[in-house]
Image (spheres, helix red, strand yellow):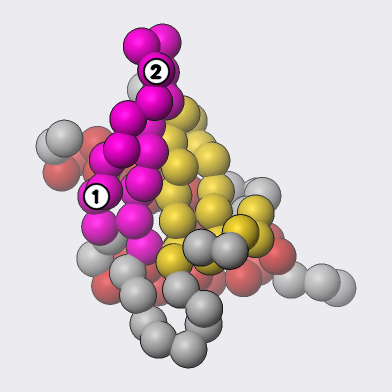
Amino acid sequence: MDANTISAVFTAATTAAHWKRTNLGLMADVNHGSYGWTVLLPGDGTTPVQAEITYRAGYGGTEYVGAVATWAQTIQLVESAMAATRVL
């Protein structure tokens, strides 16, 4: 997978309005191109871990991706996820 696609998926995830809490961390599903992507903010909140694109789903099925975000992208994703999950 090329760097432009990885960057575009992480950018799309920063605008995600819905993040799910899972036992793995916060997770968002975003669309980019003709695929659905799963972005994960892993961890239990005690140790910093970089965000990851875990899966890509399309017409042919679902496949593991495992593309890791940079720390700058991870910080943007954490801020976005915290804003989306904040209870007012």
Instruction: Point out residue 13 in the picture as x, y percentages from the top left corner.
Output: 47, 49
**Between 83 and 44, the one nearer to me in the picture:** 44
Residue at (44, 66) in percent of width and height = 42
* Residue 66 sits inside the magenta stretch: yes
Mark number displayed over residue 52: none
* Residue 84 sits inside the magenta stretch: no
Residue at (40, 86) in percent of width and height = 47
Instruction: Point out residue 68 in the picture as x, y percentages from the top left corner.
Output: 25, 57
- Tell me the magenta residue range: 51-68
Residue found at the far right of this picture: 88
Residue at (51, 82) in percent of width and height = 45
User: Which label's residue is closer to the chain start, 2 or 1?
Assistant: 2
Compared with 30, 21 (above or below) is below
Can residue 72 be seen in the rendering of this structure? Answer: no
Mark 2 or 1, which is nearer the eye?
A: 2
Q: Circle 2: is it few (<14), some (14-19), or many (20+) Cα within 10 Å? A: few
Compared with 88, 58 (above or below) is above
Residue found at the far bottom of this picture: 46
**Between 18 and 21, the one nearer to me in the picture:** 21
Q: What is the three-letter code of the residue carrying label 1?
A: Ala
Query: Whole-Å distance between the Cαs marked 2 and 1?
Result: 18 Å
Residue pointed to by mark 2: 61
Residue pointed to by mark 1: 67
Give left or right: position of 26 versus 33.
right
Q: Quadrant of residue 80?
A: bottom right
